[in-house]
Each structure stands twice: as C-alpha cells, then as structure tokens.
Image (spheres, rainbow, N blue to C red):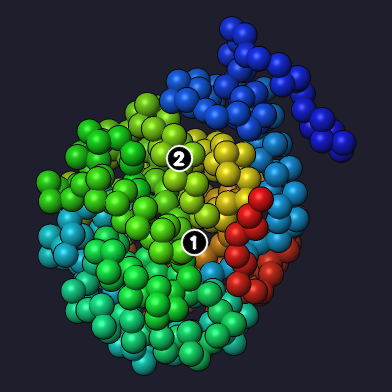
Amino acid sequence: MNAKNTKPFSCRPAGPDPKNAAKKLICRQEMTKEDFTELLRAYENQEVRKWLREEALRLRKKYYGNQVFTRGLIEFTNYCKNNCYYCGIRGANQKAVRYRLSQEEILACCQEGYKLGFRTFVLQGGEDPFYTDERMAAIVREIKDSYPDCALTLSIGEKPRESYQLFREAGADRYLLRHETANEIHYRQLHPANMSLENRTRCLNDLKSLGYQVGAGMMVGSPGQTLQCLAEDLLFLQKLQPQMVGIGPFIPHHDTCFAREPAGSVELTLYLLSLVRILLPWVLLPATTALGTLDPFGREKGLLAGANVVMPNLSPPKNRKQYELYDHKICTGEEAAECRSSLERRVTAAGFTLVSGRGDARHP
Ligand code: SAH
C-alpha cells in the first residue's frame, strides 16, 4: 500500500483468481458465504495476507487515527447458571471458587477506574440469578448517576427483551454478547441443549433495536470449528453490523470437557481481526485478553492487525484469578488497570496512543 492509498489492483468484476475474494472485500462489495470461504483459504497466501493487513491498518487509521480506546473490565460475578462446554466458570464446574461483588464493591471499582482515566466500564459476569433485573438496574443507575461522562457496557448474557429494555432505560449504553458461532451444528457442539443460536441471535437483535451499541463475536479455534463455521461467522457479522466485535483464540480450561483440546491460532485470530476491520471499518475491535494470554505480544499484534480497543482488568485483584474462563488467563502487568502507565508505554511503542474518553464507534 502506498501513501496515496491506491489499491494494489483495480476493482473490476471478479474473474477466476484466488485473490478475488480479498478484492471484493477491500472494494466493499457484498460478500457471500463462498467469498468468505475463499478469503479464509487465502490465509495461506502471504501476498493476500499482506494486502489485507495493510488495508485493515489503513482503515483503522482512517477512522480512528492512532487512537486506542480503553475499557475498565469489572468481572463482578463468576456464578453462572449456564454450562457452555468451553468455559471455566460454567455452572457444572464444582471446582470453581465462586464470588460475587456487592453494589458497593462494583462502585469502588468504578471509582478506582475513573481515577485511572477510564471512561468506559464493562460489567461482565456469568449468568448469575442473584443479580435480578431490579438489582442490575439499580447498579446501572448508580454508576450512570455517579459518572455521567462515562459509558457503561453490560456483558451478562441472554435475557428477555424486557430486561434489556429495563437496563437500557436505567442508562446502559452498550452490550457485549458474543454469538460464539453462527453455525447451528457447531453451536450444538459447544453448548448444552437448553441453549440455542436462535435465542442468542434474538438477544442480539433485541439489543440492537433497543439502541444499544452491540458487540458480537466468536472464539477462533474452538473445538469442532471449521473454515465453513468461520465463513458463517463473517456472514453473520456482515448481516448484524454490530458496533463491536470480540474475537479471541479458544484456550482450554482444565476443568471442562475441552481440557485436552488445542488452543486456537494467534495468527488466524490476527487474520480475522484484519478481515473484520475491513468488513466493518468503523468497528470497535478489542485486542483481547485471550490473545494476550497466548502470546506475550498478543495485544500489540492485535493493534497492528486492526484492533483499536484494550480492556484492562479493573476487578478487585483478589478475585481476578477466580474469573477463570480458561487456563493461565493473564490479569497482572499490562492486563491490570492499575498498571495503566505500563500499558500506555507498550501501546506507544507499538505506534499508537492510548486515549481517555468514552470511545464510541465512529459511524460512517
Ligand atoms: N456470560 C456472558 C459473558 C461470557 S464470558 C455471556 O454469555 O456473554 C466472555 C467471553 O469469553 C465468552 O463470550 C467467550 O467467547 C469467551 N470465553 C469463554 N471461555 C473461553 C475459553 N475457554 N477460551 C477463550 N475464550 C473463552
């Protein structure tokens, strides 16, 4: 890519060429499942990979400059009524040491985060029935009353539309609910029978129609995932047009059925980050903790592949290890919100600028 931003090819109609799918994506044409499959196969093609990465970085710069947004992640409960097979805090894991934070403790995390410069708080947890809709709405209201200049993101799983509406009215701005996989058969391999892709999709559509900034996403390399599944994930994202997309490698947890499964690939995750940046140029795309867990430079590599968000851990330090979604989850050093200055150094060294502020999506 040269400075004038000319593309390395012309946007003429596609002929029989392995690079066609990449051209279509870069030219912002509507993609089919076959296009996405071809694009994923092009992962092996170094030349195509280079184009896509450069285009992702160009778009990231066009929409967000060198800015990297931060979110303070508050993991406020690891109780969960669900049993997602990949997840370390699933309800059936009797070995998990459970905790939940009180409203006061959650507010104390926000206070600490605000002092550190965070202007978005993400409340994430298992699906914990202790936090009734009323309790949750009260927490949302108190955070938004105390910090009106901050955005509040919820990530507390599948709820009826009415609950989402209540939280929205209480002041919640964003909602993260990864779809996990857009392929029905694969969804069944990852979740017990009482969960469904249909309900997950219903939730995402409800959240969107209620005016949330919505985040979907998937793990890369989860057991049973094929190239076709990933192609369907990209098709799903193209249709949903979410404001945020969370993509991280699958990492096994020792107390789950997938304990012996291999972790996902860092390189393939980076490739997908670039594809999603091009597909949804204005998207908020985190360099995830899972990426940083598998690779000591995962965060930096994520930013250089097109990511523009980092989410350091703002949970009480004593609980961080207990929110164990997968083995060896990092939660100290640059992962820890209190080490913001060292995170800032690393982000700067990678050529970006860590900014304070809500960091909303810039729409086209
Ligand atoms: N209960 C909430 C939050 C789930 S935890 C919800 O349902 O949305 C947040 C994300 O962590 C999940 O969406 C999943 O994609 C990811 N995750 C869970 N287990 C994982 C594992 N073993 N490896 C990598 N990511 C995992």
In the rendered view, tell whether residue 161 sits above or below residue 223: below
Residue 48 picture location, percent across and down: 64, 24
The residue lying furthest to the front in this view is 209
Q: Earlier in the sequence, mark 2 or mark 1?
A: 1
- In percent of the image, x 82 and y 30: which residue is there? 6
Amino acid at dot 2: Lys
In the rendered view, tell whether residue 350 sits above or below residue 336: above
In the rendered view, tell whether residue 331 sits above or below residue 46: below
- In percent of the image, x 66 and y 40: which residue is there? 56
The residue lying furthest to the right in this view is 4
- In percent of the image, x 39 and y 45: which residue is there? 219
Question: Label 1: which residue?
Answer: 213
- Kindly state the secondary structure of the residue where label 1 is placed: strand
| Ligand 1 quadrant assignment | bottom left
In the rendered view, tell whether residue 253 sits above or below residue 106: above
Specify whether 273 is left or right of 216.
right
Question: Label 2: which residue?
Answer: 239
